[in-house]
Image (cartoon, helix red, strand yellow):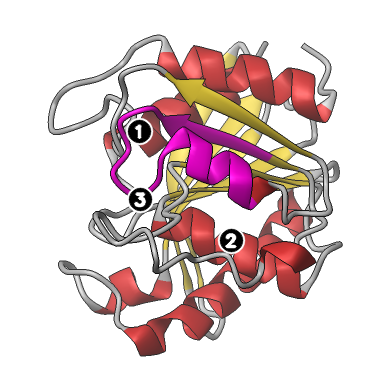
């Protein structure tokens, strides 16, 4: 466990640029987690902050980053043309974190951020040690025929899913079916009664959620606790 965690703004003038907040623990385990936000949020989302605080307290360096589309536009969802640049931004962020953390790099994201993370890892399987996907947006609400699964047969990165049983972007049964397409190691943790926000809507906070996530993350990826 880290006895002290320093949080500071983080920026690199790459293309696309990297901007976010870095949680640096002391002592540090050497491993790191990059966290990205959903389509309507940013790196200051309460869920990301809570996870970053919990993981950094356990010794992991954590970077909460704003995806390139959010750096350009403060509000609103990404457009269809933003996705490739958002993935390029994630790749730049991974390279930057490898200079900071000598151990394993993990990539995590809520909704859109998780989807782009998984697509990047499908394109480059050895880029990170593992994926943490929170509320994967399997399809738009009430449109189950529009499955976002095209890249899943190429996803070989070990992936841990957290998904609410009331998530309108995909039921547990639908996600379980989609996960069968993934050749890599996977695990699904169903969060009873939770929606797409996993209990972090507005000022509401599900205090036990980050503890559950790091507990399962530690077991799934074999981290020393």
User: Toward which corner of the image does residue 224 lie, by quadrant?
Assistant: top right
As drawn, the label of residue 148 is none
Q: Position of residue 73 (x, y in %)?
A: 21, 76
Which residue is denoted by mark 2 in the rendering?
117
Taking the image as drawn, is residue 95 in sight? no
Q: Is residue 119 magenta?
A: no
Q: Let me know if residue 65 appears in the view.
A: yes
**Which residue carries the number 3 mark?**
43
Q: Residue at x 66, y 19 (%)?
A: 216
Bin the neighbour count of mark 3 within 10 Å (Cα to Cα): few under 14, some 14-19, many 20 and up. many
Quarter of the image for residue 208 reads top left
120 lies left or right of 75: right
Q: Residue at x 26, y 29 (%)?
A: 200
Q: What span is in magenta?
A: 160-178
Q: CA distance from mark 3 to mark 1?
A: 9 Å
Foreground: disc 3 or disc 1:
1
The span from disc 1 to disc 2 (Cα, nearest Å) is 17 Å
| 3 or 2: mark nearer the eye | 2
Looking at this view, is 7 or 103 the one in front?
A: 103
User: Is residue 147 left or right of 42 when viewed as pictured?
Assistant: right
Q: Nearer the viewer, residue 145 or 158?
A: 145
Residue 167 lies in magenta, yes or no? yes
The quarter of the picture where the N terminus appears is top right
> In the shown orientation, is residue 20 left or right of residue 187?
left
Element under label 1?
helix
**Quick one: quadrant of the C terminus?**
top right
Which of 161/96 is in front?
Answer: 161
Pointer 1 local density, CA inside 10 Å: few below 14, some 14–19, many at least 20: many
Q: Earlier in the sequence, mark 1 or mark 2?
A: 1
- Residue drawn at (51%, 78%) of the image: 13
Q: Residues within 10 Å of mark 2 (few under 14, many from 20)?
A: many
Task: Residue under label 1, please give it.
Answer: 47
């Amino acid at each position: 466990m880290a006895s002290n965690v320093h949080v500071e703004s983080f920026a690199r003038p790459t293309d696309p640029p990297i901007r976010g907040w870095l949680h640096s623990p002391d002592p540090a385990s050497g491993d790191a987690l990059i966290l990205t936000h959903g389509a309507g949020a940013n790196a200051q989302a309460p869920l990301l902050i809570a996870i970053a605080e919990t993981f950094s307290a356990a010794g992991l360096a954590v970077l909460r980053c704003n995806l390139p589309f959010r750096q350009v536009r403060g509000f609103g969802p990404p457009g269809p043309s933003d996705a490739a640049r958002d993935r390029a931004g994630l790749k730049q962020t991974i390279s930057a974190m490898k200079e900071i953390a000598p151990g394993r790099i993990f990539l995590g994201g809520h909704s859109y951020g998780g989807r782009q993370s998984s697509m990047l890892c499908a394109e480059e399987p050895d880029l990170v040690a593992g994926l943490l996907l929170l509320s994967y947006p399997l399809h738009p609400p009430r449109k189950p025929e529009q499955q976002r699964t095209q890249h899943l047969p190429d996803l070989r990165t070990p992936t841990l899913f957290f998904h609410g049983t009331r998530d309108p972007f995909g039921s547990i049964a639908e996600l379980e079916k989609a996960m069968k397409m993934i050749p890599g190691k996977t695990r699904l943790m169903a969060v009873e009664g939770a929606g797409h926000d996993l209990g972090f809507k507005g000022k509401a906070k599900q205090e036990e959620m980050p503890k559950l996530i790091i507990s399962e993350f530690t077991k799934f990826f074999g981290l020393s606790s």
